[in-house]
Amino acid sequence: MRLKKNAIWIILLVLIFLMSACSNTADIENEKSEDELILAIGGEPDDGFDPATGWGRYGSPLFQSTLVTYDQDFNIQNDLATSYEVSEDGLEWTIVIRDDVTFTDGEALTADDVVFTFETAKESGSIIDLSNLDRVEGIDDYTVKFTLREPESTFIYLLASTGIVPVHAYNDNYNENPVGSGPFQLVQWDKGQQIIVEANPDYYGEKPFFKKLTFLFLSEDAAFAAAKTGAVDVVSVPPAFAGEEIAGMQLVELESVDNRGIMFPYVSEGDETAEGAPIGNEVTADSAIRQAINVGLDRQAFVDGVLEGFGTPAYSTADHLPWWNPDTVIEDANLQLANQILKEAGWLEKEDGIREKDGLTAEFTLLYPAGDQIRQSLSIAFAEMIKPLGIKVTTEGKSWNEIEYLMYSHPVMMGWGSHDPLEIYNLYSSKTRGIGYYNANYYSNPVVDDYLNQALRATSEEEANSYWKKAQWDGETGFSAQGDAPWAWLVNLNHLYFIDENLVIGEQKIQPHGHGWPITDFIEQWRWEE
């Protein structure tokens, strides 16, 4: 794809922007130091940099430390923690932390800060779900005990994603002026333009090679134009730009569980939510419709066509993560089998080619968020792909406010993808039906519920993962396309970056959903090629 005709103007605007942004730190004509990087890898965090309200959930919190962390293979490693123990009943988690850590203002990090962080996060009403945390207390200056109401295997993921904030320096403006103990510290934030961070000289972990990072907040067009001029070292790009060539830069594709799929209303019509929104859809409530669609989809065609090859077929919300069941894979589209499923279930073709069953026509409207080009294209391609099944699909873009009202009764092109298996529970447990965007299709299966509860109450990751996998498919039932098929997962997006050809970023984890800056997870290990 070629740049638009106004690319010259975009480049000029970018240069003006960069000159303005750099005026307070250095003369733009001076050559950038070897230990500095300029990045344009995503939007400005709407809620700032407060872990207690969700900052760092989809990548490194940069400015704060976490108790534990993941390595590239999703093995738990100590960060602030030196050890942790879980009681036999799974209710008590006792964590010993380092005694040599200070915040960037020189104050020591102790158990009091850990207690304060989790109490604050619990009371924040944010996306951090600590409802199962009964209490957290400091046993001594460097030992913390968490007591849960019920065993929760996924609690480890909260410990890995919640950055620790200082009790002495936390206030209403903390999100804009974060004080932490992480590898970097925020030194400047020009709203709507950039943030500048510098390496924390007192960081206890691996010292970052790069001493200064500048994150630019640019539109996709402007960010790409900046890369073309050599103004940035790392830039995230959509698939439409990935086929371009940029002198001195290489395209890096990172696999992700940043998925897109269709949520089908699972129950029949007739009910409504407390707000009066209709629940259920007679067509998608028929398991034959859902299963035939899943069998008949050519997922690779979505990758090749809509994503221009920059993605992978999706079969679940957690493909290739430790709790994923590979038996959920449907290798090839099988239109013959899909049509057979429909015919045997009583869905017969009319003269116009559309199927009908007991006077009900096999048709529905698929909703997608207006303005999301990828979801729109996936929706249109989906509607065309299942025409041979005799199912008529109309696609329609809506605002999220409109979708929030209609999603209980209409299929919706959704997107998820987390490093926390609790997302599986939230999407498929009967206890979460109608709660937020999660189980908005009102899916329920008592066998699946039992597996999900056993996974959640397990006292080891290995045991928990075995139950997460069974919930997907145990050979007879499950929530995957092999079983009840309440979703049709289509694709996982590759996260795409143009990176300076001499910059080494090392091995990365499978990326989560695109919120935040997940590529920064191991940024302290980045360095120039020797």
Image: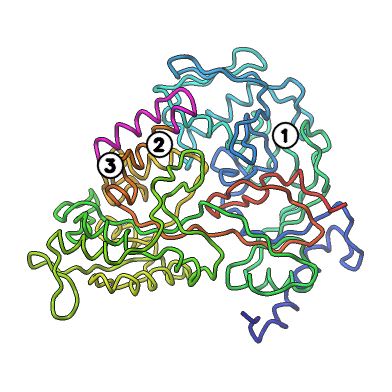
User: What residue range appears in magenta?
Assistant: 445-465
Q: Label 1 near label 2: C-beta < 8 Å?
A: no
Q: Which of marks 2 and 1 is nearer the N terminus?
A: 1
Q: Which of marks 2 and 3 is nearer the N terminus?
A: 2
Q: Distance between the residues labelled 1 and 3?
A: 47 Å
Question: Which residue type does callout 1 highlight?
Answer: Ser
Q: Neighbour class for label 3 at 10 Å: few (<14), some, many (≥20)?
A: some
Residue 100's tag is none
Q: Which residue is pictured at 88% across the width and 52% down the height? A: 530
Residue 509's x, y, as percent?
A: 62, 46
Q: Which mark's residue is nearer the viewer, 2 or 3?
A: 3
Q: Label 3 near label 2: C-beta < 8 Å?
A: no
Looking at the rendered structure, the secondary structure element under dot 2 is helix
Q: How is the image coloured?
A: rainbow
447 and 201: which one is in front? Answer: 447
Q: Earlier in the sequence, mark 1 or mark 3?
A: 1
Which residue has dot 2 on it?
468
Residue reaching furthest to the left: 358
Looking at the rendered structure, the secondary structure element under dot 3 is loop
The reply, left or right, for residue 297 in relation to residue 196 is left
508 and 163: which one is in front? Answer: 508
* 168 is higher (above) or lower (below) than 271: above
Which residue has dot 3 on it?
477
* 510 is higher (above) or lower (below) than 38: above
Which residue has dot 1 on it?
181
Q: Give the prevailing secondary structure in the magenta stretch.
A: helix
